[in-house]
Amino acid sequence: MNEPDVFVVADNVLSPLGKTTAENFSKLKQNISGVKQQQDKAISPQPFYASLFDKGAAFIDIDQHKYTKFEQLLIASISDALQNGDVNAKDKKTVLIISSTKGNISLLETEKNNHDLQKRIALSTSSKLVAEYFGFVNQPIIISNACISGVLGIITGMRLLRSEQYETAVIAGADVISSFILSGFQSFQALSPQGCKPFDQSHDGLNLGEGAGTIILSTNKKYAENIKVKGGSVSNDANHISGPSRTGAELAYAIKQSLQDAALSPGDIDFISAHGTATVYNDEMEAKAIGLCGLQSVPLNSLKGYYGHTLGAAGLIESIISVQSLKAGLVLPTMGFKEIAANCPVNVTASLMPVKANHFLKTASGFGGCNAAVVFGK
Amino acid sequence: MLTENYITASCSISDGIVFKDSQQLFENKSAELSAFLLSVYQHFQLNYPKFYKMDNLSKLGWLAAGVLLKDGFNKDNYQPEEIGIVLANANSSLDDDLKYLETVKDGPSPSLFVYTLPNIVIGEISIRNKFKGEHAFFIQDAFDAAFIEKQVSYLLDKDILRACICGWVDVLEQDYKAVLFLVEKKKSENAVLFSAENMDAIYKKI
């Protein structure tokens, strides 16, 4: 049974670097990062490095008070993507998918805990508000699967379209950094005391980041010239809930399955957008997995040095930027990377690199032992 | 033609009662949730020290999976990558989020922070059973059997998985409910067809 191709129709990246995909890609080509030292006592008593929106920044013009910052980010990002793609949210063949790890969790820090607040925090409440704003007629799908949430959103959308349950999927992800999230990563000693350095000799932890991303996929043949989502896969380490696999075999399995799903071989992959959090454990596991797939010499970058780890948005933002790279034939550098870490035998890009590219691989991994891989191509 | 998929086992834990395949196996109505979960663990003699460090969401899901898989499921029939888990709930990890936040002022607890993600229960079930296949955690305001049926059927029908645990695991303070289904591609004794209607019927029984 032949499944329809899934095309990328439109997208948006909303980050401290810019409000559109084009603004973001332009900043990245100039090697400009959103990560800087932050002093915000509401988030942390000590200064910390992260990529955050300016305090009090406005994202949408109307109903400022009805929507939380998390919801405003989703609305602003989805609005821009819908406009770019001239996509009708109200069509009954269109579905909204929302990816987030912690959504409105920051409300717990400032509001009184009671039943109403618990309802307000629920991701289904946010999703309903966002869906109503645009008039989506189908019930939104919500994914909360740690740091693979964004990539899993794309894979879920791809499958819903392939099985012809819908024609168009609007996949949006966002996360907001508050004391809750920052203190947790601090307690894990996972944060770098400076700008993060993915795969570098001196990689010493991650930076957190805020952002939203939206990608619109469709099986409509009128988009047949567009970039395609060609395959995807998810796996579990079954090893440890907060530490990655020792061997990388499970992420390698997801990569191999996503290539098989895309009917491609490792030689067809022209560059890799890695998860690359810049923690020693993550980078080493990822490098092992990439080696197990025979992809160790393929140009690879991590965008965490520009955006920090944007959690549920990361897989979306990094996929969307990489689609721009694919179109422009330009693999972006890895901010923070100078010399390869001893246990990371992969081909990390240190500067902007022109390539003749047809396909790229995007990977992600997260707490709970989850791994995901997705392949985009021409 | 596609082969049909079957619910070969189910386990429900709610309101102080543990059911397997619609048979009541255990009851303890007097205890608060943590004590109830411990009593389930002890009753079924699931010897697994890691149980004690889990949050209530992971304990509930892990126990339901333990009862679901005991007596009858032979994981050696499958490769680790052929078994997956697709779960949903309404309250994400809010139960543990509240507990974690209480620790932030006096020194945030990494052991509570790690459970502030709903998919950790999938990780715990996977670690126990060495399941390495596809998985996903969805948030829904109520159990959407039709959606779960489509997600799991896709994975089985495309041969991405050969067996899948799916269902609902939700905890918030003293409110809780877990209903898990084991779905396989072969019919066994007492198996029912894997359908949204059959899942809903089992879900609503308790």
Image (spheres, coloured by chain):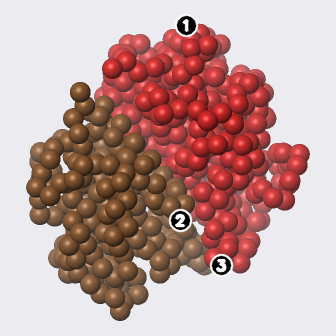
Residue A80 horizontal side relative to residue A374, left or right: right
Compute the Cα span from label 3 to label 1. 56 Å
Label 1, label 2: how far apart the Cα atoms are: 46 Å
What secondary structure is marked by label 2?
A: loop
Kindly report which numbered mark, 1 or 2, lies closer to the viewer in this rendering.
Answer: 2
State if disc 2 and disc 3 touch (CB < 8 Å).
Answer: no
Q: Colour of chain A?
A: red
User: What is the three-letter code of the residue carrying label 2?
Assistant: Asn
Residue A196 location, x and y as percent? Answer: 60, 42
| Quadrant of image for the N terminus of chain B | top left
Alpha carbon of mark 3 to alpha carbon of mark 2: how far? 14 Å
Looking at the rendered structure, the kind of residue marked 1 is Lys
Q: Quadrant of residue A225?
A: top right
> In the rendering, what colour is chain B?
brown
Q: Is residue A48 visible?
A: yes
Residue B143 vs B86, above or below: the answer is below
Q: Amino acid at mark 3?
A: Asn
Crowding at dot 2, Cα within 10 Å, few <14 / some 14-19 / many 20+, comes out as many
Q: Relative to A242, is A301 above or below? A: above
| Residue at numbered disc 3 | A114
User: What number is the disc on residue A162?
Assistant: none
- For disc 2, the marked residue is B91
Residue at 58% of width from left, 48% of height from top?
A139
Above or below, A109 against A96 in this view is below
Disc on res. A356:
1
Give the class, few, some or many, for how many residues have Cα within 10 Å of label 1's Cα (few <14, many ≥20).
Answer: few
**Residue A23 picture location, percent across and down:** 78, 27
Quarter of the picture holding the C terminus of chain B: bottom left
* Residue in view at x 52 percent, y 55 percent: B139
